[in-house]
Amino acid sequence: MTEDKPLIPPPHPPRRHGFFGALRASFLAGLVVILPIALTVWLIWSVTGWIDGWVLPLVPYRFRPEHYIGIDLRGVGVIFFLLFTVVIGFFAKGFFGRSIIRQAESLVDRMPVVRSVYSGIKQIAETIFAQNETSFDKACLVEYPRPGTWAIGFVSTMAKGEIAARSPAGDPLVSVFVPTTPNPTSGFLLYVPESQLSYLEMTIEDAAKLIISAGLVYPQPRPPAGETQGAGQPAGQSSSPSPTTPPAAGRSVPPAAPLPQKEKDPA
């Protein structure tokens, strides 16, 4: 009596790509190469033109290069903007500049709507560009929008003021910015107890790539310190075992079989 064996369908033969299939594969491979370069150039070109459109109308025509060479060069407004920003920063660090800024801010504080907008933008700029504090230097996982569902967030700062005073004892609140996909400039501000955060080893740039790509672009895992990215062996050593390496514990090595000897020819 024969045993019933399950019917296993035969494996399908490999699909052969024709001429148009090869063209399609080459087209997709070309897009992978061209698309990042094209988008990067387009973004830089657009931002440069936007800055030129704002800055160049404020520069007298006799100071522009097209007044002498007759050609409108893109990026001149960016150079004027950088030079102007450096000069204002150097001026603001002096005593005379600080006194003028204080008088201007006292005048702005008397304006009902303008002072709210100015103070908010100033606090954001001081927080982002402050050199003595680090902001958005860590990525983390936070349970959002419900328990059991995790989202990637950026740790901004520890809670301060009234929010810090209302935080649980021994578990301070941390302000976490949870960006949206694929536009990471918008998102949600959450105050989460520090014990409920799971910090990630990936950098902010890698986390931003993961968010923008909707989970398609994962960062490359970094090898531990002193190890290579391959087989996890220390740097400078080969992954092949040494001939003098003892056998692993719990394994018995069978004795080597004797070599066959040649029979002697009868005399």
Image (spheres, rainbow, N blue to C red):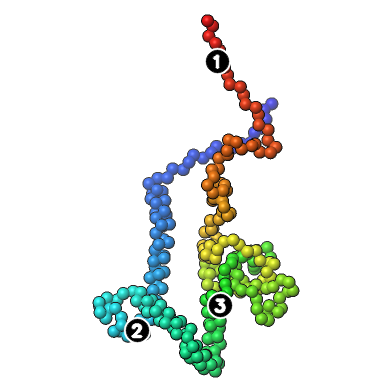
How far, Cα to Cα, is label 1 from label 2? 99 Å
The answer to whether residue 53 of the structure is visible from this angle is: no
Mark 2 is surrounded, within 10 Å at the Cα level, by few (under 14), some (14 to 19) or many (20 or more) other residues, namely few
- Amino acid type at mark 2: Val
Residue that carries the numbered disc 1 in the rendered image: 262
Please tell me whether residue 217 is drawn above or below residue 92 in the rendered image: above
Mark 3 is surrounded, within 10 Å at the Cα level, by few (under 14), some (14 to 19) or many (20 or more) other residues, namely some
Q: Earlier in the sequence, mark 1 or mark 2?
A: 2
- Amino acid type at mark 1: Lys
How far, Cα to Cα, is label 3 from label 1? 86 Å
User: Regarding mark 2 in the picture, which secondary structure is present there?
Assistant: loop
When asked about the image quadrant of residue 247, the answer is top right
- Name the one closer to the observer, 191 or 267: 267
- Extreme right residue here? 169
User: Regarding mark 1 in the picture, which secondary structure is present there?
Assistant: loop
Name the side, left or right, on which 264 lies relative to 76: right
- Extreme top residue here? 267
What is the number of the mark on residue 59? 2
Please tell me whether residue 181 is drawn above or below residue 30 in the rendered image: below
User: Regarding mark 3 in the picture, which secondary structure is present there?
Assistant: helix
Residue at 52 percent across and 67 percent down: it is 182
- Amino acid type at mark 3: Thr
The answer to whether residue 209 of the structure is visible from this angle is: yes
Do the residues under discs 2 and 3 have CB atoms within 8 angstroms? no
Q: Position of residue 24 (x, y in %)?
A: 40, 52
Do the residues under discs 1 and 2 have CB atoms within 8 angstroms? no
User: Split into 4 quadrants, where in the image is the N terminus?
Assistant: top right
Q: Earlier in the sequence, mark 3 or mark 1?
A: 3
The count of marks equals: 3
When asked about the image quadrant of residue 159, the answer is bottom right
Residue that carries the numbered disc 3 in the rendered image: 127
Please tell me whether residue 77 is drawn above or below residue 114 in the rendered image: above
